[in-house]
Structures are given as C-alpha cells and as structure tokens.
Amino acid sequence: MTFSSGDQAILHIDLDALVANWRRLGGMAPQAECAAVVKADAYGTGAAEVGKALQKAGCRRFFVAHSEEALALRQALPDVTIHILHGPTAGGEAELAAANLTPVLSTPGQIAAWSALAKQLGRRLPAALHVDTGMNRLGLSETEAYAVATDPTRLDGIELAFVMSHLACSDEPDHPLNRQQADAFAALRQRFPNLKGSLANSAGIFLGADFHHDILRPGIALYGANPLDPSAGPRRAASRMAEVVHLQGKILQVRSVDRGMTVGYGAGYIVEKPTQIATVAVGYADGFSRALSGRGSAIIKGRQGHVRVPIAGRVSMDLITLDVSALDASDCRPGTPVSLLGGGIDLDDQAAAAGTIGYELLTQLGRRYRRVYKSSAA
Ligand SMILES: *Cc1c(COP(=O)(O)O)cnc(C)c1O
C-alpha cells in the first residue's frame, strides 16, 4: 500500500478477518450465542464500523462498558441488543430505557433503580444480572445474589435476560481460580433456573464446554490478539487469531549517522558504526507507546523480503527513529511504508516489548491515523 501525499500513517482494519474471528469463536460453542464486546470503541478499532460488520454477519448482542458508548452504538445499530457492563448511572436510567438499552445490573441499588423506573413507566424493562464469583471487581456478591433469588419481588418490572459472571484468570488455563469460578457459577445458575448464563470472555471460550454456558462474550480475540497468556505454552498455537489491525507509518527522512553520534532525545542511543536512520511519522501522541523506546521493532518490505528493524532511541511525540542499515538504500526512502503493528509485527510481541498487553496497545490507537476499513461484505 502506498501513501497518498497527505498521509502520515494508515491504520488498516480488516473487518473480514474480524468477522472470521467471531465466526470461529462462535463455532467453538455451537449451542451458545456468540455476542461481541465492543467497549472502548471496539478496543480502538471503531465500534460503529465493527458493530455493523458483525451485525451483517449475524451478531445480535453487543456489550459496551459505559452508558455513553451504548447510546452512541444505538445510533449505528438500531435493532440489536446492547448491554452496558457498568450498569445504569444513577439518574441516567430513563435515557437508557428510552434508547431500548439493556444494562447489566451489578448492585442492589442498580436493581432497585431499574425496577422503580419500570414501575414508573408501567412496562417491563430488560436487564442482565452480574454476580461476582471471585474477581472482586463488579457484580453482586453471592450473598446478595441469593437474596435476590429468594425474594424475586426485588426484580419487579425487570425482564432478566441472563445472569453473568467474569473470569479473572482465563488467559492462564491452568490457574485454579478458573475451576473455582466455573463451579461457583454453575451453583449460582441453580438458583436462577430459568435464566440463561454467560461466563466466557475470549480466553474463557478456549477453556472448554464447562465455561461456555449460553452467551459468549469475546472481546480481544475478535481484534486479533491471542487470548491466552504465554504461560499457556504450546496450547497458545491453537488460539492464534486472524490479524485485524495493521498500522503502517511512513518514512519522512533517511540520514547517515557516523560512529560516536547519538540519535533522538536524551542522546541515549549511541551509534557504534556508520548507521542509516529512518525517521517515521508516528509517535506517542498516536498511542505508540514510549515504552517501546529502544525495545520495539518495525518491518520494512525490501528486495530481500520483509526486514525487521529496531527502534533506535526514544519514541518522541510525533516521530520514531529506526536503524535501517540492514536495508538497501533504494528500499528505504521518504514515503516508504513501515509496519509498526501487524504486517509481520505480532501485536502480542510488540505489547510484551512495551511491558504491556495487546489490549492496551489497541485501545491507545491514535486518532491521527487515516483509518481504512477492509470489508468484502460492504
Ligand atoms: C472486557 C470484558 C469482556 C471481554 O473480555 P476479552 O478478554 O477482551 O475477551 C467480557 N466480559 C466482561 C465483563 C468484560 O469486562
């Protein structure tokens, strides 16, 4: 892909690959419904575009974190079920009901407010119930959940769609908390015998049938990251997903730097032999982590094939510098595209080089990139 003159960087988002990932995850639990988690603007990839592509493929249920995300997604997707993981904000309930959104209720206060609104409106309002089974983050405690189960009047006016819980360690398949949470969730479902259940995030889907229940909630795997942690060892090969995100920066300049000179802020990168340095128009203001300074790598397609080159010196606000000495000068010129994520740079590897996880690299993806969506269904 060549750059048109104004582009500094292009973010390619492959919606076909994303849909293929969604189908594959759903296929792993054919009796369950595969929803999609599109919080944080679909992990940085664009919730409206991703939502429409998945809806076209048959996805009918979406999860976001905030009410505002749900209201925005409702504009793009008038006919699907949209769940708000953080539940309704106090005082904001009526707006959510008017937009036909389905909050996930996690506290007795949220249940009471949603039930009160239903009575006031004189109609049943849909919701889901989140019960904590060991993460200790969001959700009713098991005691609170059992209190609700024994006194269903607390749910007056609420049409419960399902009961859910969230796994703390699903990316580590051997972690003992997985089994404990699966058992606690199975016991909880006995108390709500007529409700569907939802437990598995992306990694949870790979833990097997005991974790699948009725509704799957994949996020990260849709966007191409491997949901399992490196500690999963060889099993990780089976959870590799199709690449969705490819970030290409553009070379602005190439310069020869002599032995003993330094590159970039802080003069921390000292050149030990004559070196070719290429300056690329992406920096930390674009969400390209400054933690990749001297650690990350990039790929340039030259006549020898794809050549991996190191980031030399610090990532600055709008620029990075690469040591491109390994390339032929004619393959490395102003305008040459450079892959910084995807296109041979594995998302999870680049994240590890930055000391973080793929989730964070994706959700930081910058607003200055020209975004190009690939979709054969469009
Ligand atoms: C973010 C989130 C998910 C999706 O998790 P992934 O690891 O990205 O698949 C599912 N459920 C809940 C409650 C979440 O917060």
Image (cartoon, helix red, strand yellow):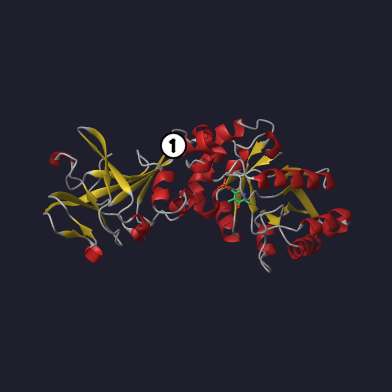
User: Residue 4: x, y in percent?
Assistant: 25, 46
Name above or below for residue 162 compared with residue 92.
Answer: above
Residue at point 18% right, 60% down? 262
User: Residue 186: x, y in percent?
Assistant: 77, 43
Quadrant of the image for the N terminus? Answer: top left
Looking at this view, is 59 or 310 the one in front?
310
- Secondary element under disc 1, as helix, strand or loop, is loop
User: Residue 207: x, y in percent?
Assistant: 63, 37
Looking at this view, is 163 or 59 the one in front?
163
Q: Callout 1: few (<14), some (14-19), or many (20+) C-alpha neighbours within 10 Å?
A: some
Q: List the residue tagged with mark 1.
A: 375
Name above or below for residue 334 compared with residue 67.
Answer: above
Name the side, left or right, on which 314 lies relative to 362.
Answer: left
Residue at point 57% right, 40% down? 55
| Residue 118 visible in the picture | yes
Residue at point 77% right, 50% down? 160
Using the rendered view, name the quadrant where residue 13 is placed.
top left
Name the side, left or right, on which 265 lies relative to 63.
Answer: left
Residue furthest to the bottom in view is 91
How many marks on residues?
1
Name the side, left or right, on which 345 lies relative to 213.
Answer: left
Q: Amino acid at mark 1?
A: Ser
| Residue 156 visible in the picture | no
User: Residue 50: x, y in percent?
Assistant: 50, 44
Residue at point 79% right, 48% down? 188
